[in-house]
Image: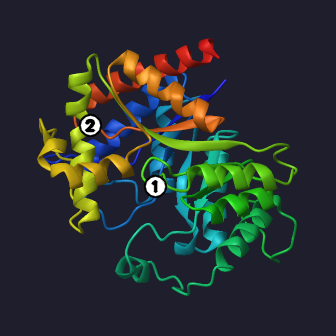
Amino acid sequence: MTHYSLLDLVPVIEGGSVAQALANAADIAAHVERLGFTRYWTAEHHGMTGIASAATSVVLAHIGNATSTIRIGAGGIMLPNHAPLAIAEQFGTLDALFPGRIDLGLGRAPGSDQIVARAMRRNLDSDANAFPQDVVELQSYFADDGQTGIRATPGAGADVSLWILGSSTFGAQLAAMLGLPYAFASHFAPDALMAAIDIYRRTFRPSAVLAKPYVMAGFNVFAADSDEEAELLASSQQQAFVALRTGHPRQLPPPVAGYRASLGAQGAAILDHVLSCSAVGGPAKVARDIAAFVARTGVDELMIASAIYDHGARKRSLEITAQAMQDVAIAA
């Protein structure tokens, strides 16, 4: 069975507020828990007016209080921004609050531009070895093996599930070498998906935490009761993505009919390529597109991304997604 989970960047809609976005996040998390989603993840982004998840561990404490069984975690924490000890303490605290429910996905991108990265007060050296070393240091704090000479409190002995994130083959190689689960960001960077999965599965080394490869892939879903309504809902994310890629990030805008066509053939083709790992449509079309993606990739889990302007429409989209995933499981 292919598991299904939710990546929520806690979108701030145009005309809305951070407080509203955080309230919606808690409601969405409780909603997907009832729908059978395996985990709820949010992610670290900085300097973006449309994303309210920058203080990721704080947001997860908020989500933990709104839920009771679903796994919660970061997808991810951008480790170059932080001292590994600080992350061990934060996620050790989360594990103490919500035992057995905490995931920690680790990425090596800054999740921001260089100006914001400098403001994070971390070393901006581009040494490719720094990220693997930081991951191993973080593992040592959780294992409480004494290798660092420091005991993380909280953190030592915490039951935190570590993941390696990536949008290239680098993360696949590292996850395979360390014997950790791997999550690929195909929901916005699909080009290296199949190559990364192949490298990860082929070179995987079993570890104390994982006996065989486990692959998650990001997948956008904009579902509604009709194909036409779903196309309209998807236009909010499309607008936000174009704004981001052209250097003008914005809050999540309301949907606009005919937006994709308004970009022209070249603009629409670029958008379709970047968001190619997506399902947009009514229940039948979404189920077909999800089934085709799972068959093509053989992933163990889908991480659903679904930024929709209207909160009620987003909840309905997730209901349709859950039903589609259950249908895929029955068909398999």
Q: Position of residue 161 (x, y in %)?
A: 70, 48
* Residue nearest the viewer, comparing 24 with 170: 170
Crowd band around label 2 with a 10 angstrom C-alpha radius: few (<14), some (14–19), many (20+): many
Q: Position of residue 273 (x, y in %)?
A: 37, 50
Residue 138 appears in the figure: yes
Q: Position of residue 51 (x, y in %)?
A: 32, 54
From this view, report whether residue 237 is shown above or below residue 78: above
Identify residue type, mark 2.
Answer: Ala
* Residue nearest the viewer, comparing 294 with 113: 294
* Relative horizontal placement of residue 22, taking residue 243 as reference (left or right): right
Residue 251 appears in the figure: no
* Relative horizontal placement of residue 283, taking residue 38 as reference (left or right): left
* Residue nearest the viewer, comparing 78 with 19: 78
Residue wearing tag 2: 234
* Residue nearest the viewer, comparing 133 with 220: 220
Q: Residue at x 39, y 80 (%)?
A: 114
Quadrant of residue 101 within the rendered picture: top right
The tally of labels here is 2
Q: Which mark is residue 189?
A: 1
Q: Residue at x 29, y 22 (%)?
A: 224
Which element type, helix, strand or loop, lies under badge 2?
Answer: helix
Name the N-terminal-most of marks 2 and 1.
1
* Relative horizontal placement of residue 34, taking residue 127 as reference (left or right): left
Cα gap from disc 2 to disc 1, whole angstroms: 17 Å
Q: Residue at x 53, y 25 (%)?
A: 291
Crowd band around label 1 with a 10 angstrom C-alpha radius: few (<14), some (14–19), many (20+): some
Identify residue type, mark 1.
Answer: Ala
Report the quarter where the C terminus lies: top right
Which element type, helix, strand or loop, lies under badge 1?
Answer: loop
Q: Position of residue 193 (x, y in %)?
A: 56, 51
* Relative horizontal placement of residue 259, taking residue 323 as reference (left or right): left
